[in-house]
Image: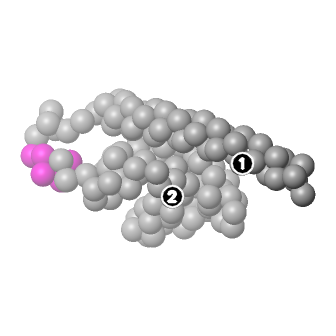
Amino acid sequence: MDNKLATIKERILQIVESKGVKRVDFCREIGISTANLRGSAKNTAVNSDTVANILSLYQDISPDWLISGQGEMLRSDLTAATDAKDKPTTTEQIAMAMETLVESNKILSESNLKLAEVNTRLVAILEKKEKHE
């Protein structure tokens, strides 16, 4: 599995660039420190509040793209909709984003369990090898 959660911050930086806003202003708007988008901190996950804030403030951003990297950055359904009633509400956007985030977290948890099992087996093999040497 690709570590899609780690690349959410890369996509956030793409939003900053595409919107033409200063990184410090964008971070203040969505409620994070600019340090979250620099150095090794770029490889850490973002919390659901951050995702919700981005999707609330920038309703043209695709929740699927932000969370999973799938599809286009901008929502085609919002640009194609001519009637306000056809547009998803912010609540619906957040709900969709949360569903995707929950599913991503499940997949990540399953992967972490498998890695822990492999790690335990490797430690046992190494310990056994050390005893024989």
Q: Residues within 10 Å of mark 2 (few under 14, many from 20)?
A: many
- Disc 1 secondary structure class: helix
Q: Which residue is rendered at x = 24% and y = 36% of the image?
A: 88
Q: Which residue is mark 1?
A: 122
Secondary structure mostly taken by the magenta-highlighted segment of the chain? helix
Q: Which residues are magenta?
A: 78-82
Compared across the picture, whether 86 is left or right of 9 comes to left
Residue 132 horizontal/vertical position (percent): 87, 52
Label 1: how many Cα within 10 Å (few below 14, some 14–19, many 20+):
few
Q: Residue at x 48, y 43 (%)?
A: 51
Residue 45 vs 23, above or below: the answer is above
Q: Position of residue 48 (x, y in %)?
A: 53, 37
Nearer to us of marks 2 and 1 is: 1
* Position of residue 54 in the picture relative to residue 82 (left or right): right
Dot 2 falls on a residue whose secondary structure is helix
The residue under the point 31% across, 31% down is: 92
- Judge from the rendering whether residue 38 lies leftward or rightward of residue 124; answer left or right: left
The tag earlier along the polypeptide, 2 or 1, is 2
Q: Please name whichever residue, 114 or 84, is drawn nearer the observer in this view of the structure.
A: 114
Residue 72 in view in this figure:
yes
| Image color mode | one colour
Q: Is residue 110 depicted above or below 44 in this figure?
A: above
Residue 41: where, in percent of width, then height? Answer: 68, 58
Label 1 sits on what residue type?
Answer: Leu
Give the residue at mark 2. Answer: 7
Residue 6 included in the magenta stretch of the image: no
